[in-house]
Amino acid sequence: LSPGGFARFRERTSAFDRAVSVTPVGDGSLSYVATVDGRTAPFDAPMATWLSHLLPEVLREAAINVPARVARLRAQGGVPAVLQEISQIHSSSAKRAHYEELIKHGPTLSESDAEKIARQVGEDLTSSSDLSAVLQMLPRSAIQSPVARQSIAGALSRIKSSGDKANTLEILAPNADPEMLLLLAKTAEDVQSSGDKANFLTATASEYLSPSSEPLRNAYFRAVSTLRSSGDMANVLMSALPYGHANPPVTLKVIETSNGLASSGDAANVLISLVSQRLLQPGAPRATLALIERTLTMASTGDRANVLITLAGSGVLSNPQVKDAFIKAAMALPSE
């Protein structure tokens, strides 16, 4: 303590109330005044021991000297020693500071170390924003093993905030391998906010729909089908449409998933957009037949008619089977 400085440390529990005040003396030494339950007490060996145990806890909880502490512990006992220290911290923000220091600085994390961090962080951090921030920092190269992936999945499930969870999924998706993408899509199904989930699905469409991977495609549209808002689902499906040019099965999945649209108007917008973008080809009637069949389940006669009118002008009604299906759909319109 510099001249004129002052420090006071107090711990109050159901069993005792201890405090020590510290001031500098003119010769450079320190003067200690102790109290127990409000009464002056000697600063003896037991009191000094109590203070020596309290100080490290105060420093940990206040996230003071984190870089030096993490470096020292890592040098002494590796990542497990740091994780042991973190497990003793109560403050979520202080835990986060120690995790960030562990991940960002020092030697590169091994796969084994990343597994340990991923396994503990989900149990340690109670704040959604803190947990989200730490998961986003984990190096992708260190979370390739099945154990690490399952630990990540468990940690993601503990993020309560829809916004934090969706944002974390979006950050982890770029450059993720197929196994990780499948895990992220599965986690996205549980995002409660329709808007947050839609944002994730729109932002990551290229990761799931650019490669001709049936598992990735199915996982993506399975997540889309869990959207509660008809408008959000329609927007996501329309954002997926361009990928159908290079990957025709995407077009079929859009038509199939559109069955989940509660709004007839939203369904019409998606199907008309699909036709307008020339995703239907005369030589591939399967998608055209699926679209015609989809109109039969639309509640609004006007919306059904608008889709059929757009389809009629698209030049794809050249196949006898398609023509027959189109006429039957037109004849099924309730309104004269």
Image (cartoon, rainbow, N blue to C red):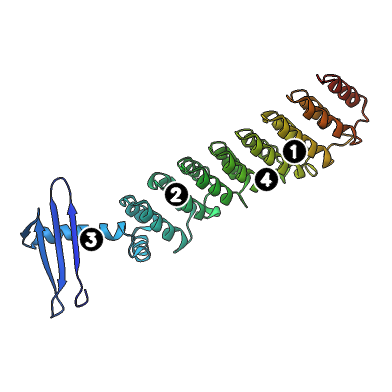
Say whether disc 1 or disc 4 marks the residue closer to the N-terminus.
4
Q: Secondary structure at mark 2?
A: helix
Amino acid residing under circle 2: Leu
Q: Measured from the top left, where is residue 48 in percent x and y?
A: 13, 61
Instruction: Tell which of 278 and 66 is nearer to you.
Output: 278
Q: Nearer the viewer, residue 326 or 301?
A: 301
Q: Which residue is mark 1?
A: 250
- Report which residue position mark 2 lands on: 131
Q: Secondary structure at mark 1?
A: helix
Q: Is residue 102 above or below residue 247?
A: below
Q: Earlier in the sequence, mark 3 or mark 1?
A: 3
**Which residue is under mark 4?**
205
Q: Determine whether, in the image, residue 42 is placed left or right of residue 139.
A: left
Task: Report the quarter where the C terminus lies.
Answer: top right
Question: SS at mark 3?
Answer: helix
Classify mark 2: residues with Cα within 10 Å, few (<14), some (14-19) or many (20+): many
- For the N terminus, the image quarter is bottom left
The disc at residue 55 is: 3
Q: Determine whether 247 is above or below 302 in the image.
A: below
**Residue 68 falls in image quadrant:** bottom left
